[in-house]
Amino acid sequence: MDGVNKRRMNEKFLKTAVLASGRGSNLQALIDAWQSGELPIELVAVGSDQSEAQALSRAEAAGIASKAFPLRNYPDRFAQEEDLLAWLHGHKVELLLLAGYMRVLKTDFIREAGFPILNIHPSLLPAFPGVHAQRQAVEYGVRYSGCTVHFVDEGLDSGPIILQEVVPVLPEDTEDTLAARILEVEHRLYPEAVRLLARGRLKRQGRQVRISKA
Ligand code: GRF
């Protein structure tokens, strides 16, 4: 057995869930990478706060368990997150990926999760956190923006940064043209960050995330 195959046999396939509120193109990029054997994870669950999210049908098409947790079914956000977390624990989730999940997870959820949570954001954090990051970049007049994969902490897009990639902002850009250019990079960067984490190559030291050699 060669070194690569030996490593594959020893690799632990992290049970992974994704939360998405909408279109789910990042989810699709993760599904594609996983199905083509490029990610040492097992996608076990996709959750959403929106019953109509396209992400849920993408999960269904890929044979992944999926469920909507619409806020209107709960007395408050705490109850919704408690139910969501119980569902994730029921699937024995070891890694959670936010991919266009349009809610900031509450402190209780993050503390009680017991697994790492990653997010992808369409700007070079700490610039332009929150919604409409691409519009913020165009309106500010920056020459470069990009995307960031980071660990989720209790703040808004403020956790330790894992990977970033720069994308140029062109003079004629609108929010939509810039978003499309950044999205192409997101679809490559998110699977790459997940691969690093699943292979045990990320080490957190306070705000710094060290990436060890393969
Ligand atoms: C992406 O731009 C992501 O960075 C942001 O929300 C968008 C989700 O797009 N957090 P999609 O649903 O993955 O297509």
Image (cartoon, helix red, strand yellow):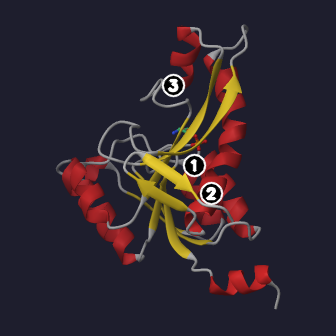
Quarter that holds the N terminus: bottom right
Q: Seen in the image, is 118 located left or right of residue 10?
A: left
Where is residue 10? Give x, y as percent.
63, 86
Give above or below for 186 relative to 210. Answer: above
Q: Is residue 182 visible?
A: yes
Total numbered labels placed on residues in the image: 3
Please tell me whether mark 3 sits on a helix, a strand or a loop: helix
- Residue at the image position 57 percent from the left and 68 percent from the top: 198
* Marked residue nearer the N-terminal end (2 or 3): 2
Q: Which label is found at residue 58?
A: 2
Q: Mark 2: give few (<14), some (14-19) or many (20+) Cα within 10 Å.
A: some
User: In front here: 147 or 24?
Assistant: 147
Q: Which residue is mark 1?
A: 54
Q: Secondary structure at mark 1?
A: helix
Residue at the (49%, 51%) spot, across then down: 209
Q: Which quadrant would residue 191 be assigned to in this image?
A: bottom right
Q: Earlier in the sequence, mark 1 or mark 3?
A: 1
